[in-house]
Amino acid sequence: MSQMMSSGLFLPNMDAAKGRALFASKGCVVCHSINGVGGEDAPALDAAYMDLPMNPFEFAARMWRGAPAMVGIPPAGAV
């Protein structure tokens, strides 16, 4: 079931296992870390650095702001 955030905006159910798999399969873990696990070349994505409650739209905006630095990085396993 989805959760309504604001008029007309819905947040889908989140799945930690799927998020973990996506984080690894997209190669994010090479540069970013979560709770001390992962790379050290990019900002940590620990929950301690997130606003509570976490706003997924702000998180996505932060990712897009960092996109220019990530564009030149080859996908994991493509070396």
Image: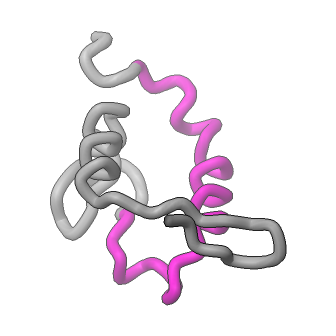
Residue 41 picture location, percent across and down: 34, 48
> Residue 61 vs residue 48: left or right?
right
Vertical side of 55 occupied by 37: above or below: above
Vertical side of 62 occupied by 73: above or below: above
> Residue 14 vs residue 35: left or right?
right
As drawn, the residue found furthest toward the front would be 1
- In the depicted view, which residue is nearer to us: 62 or 8? 8
Q: Residue at x 35, y 77 (%)?
A: 47
Q: Quadrant of the C terminus?
A: top left
Asked whether 72 falls inside the magenta stretch, the response is yes
Vertical side of 54 occupied by 61: above or below: above
Residue 72 picture location, percent across and down: 53, 23
The image shows a total of numbered marks equal to 0
Which stretch appears magenta?
45-74
Residue 60, quarter of the rendered image: bottom right
As drawn, the residue found furthest toward the top would be 79
Residue 11, quarter of the rendered image: bottom right
Q: Residue at x 74, y 66 (%)?
A: 9
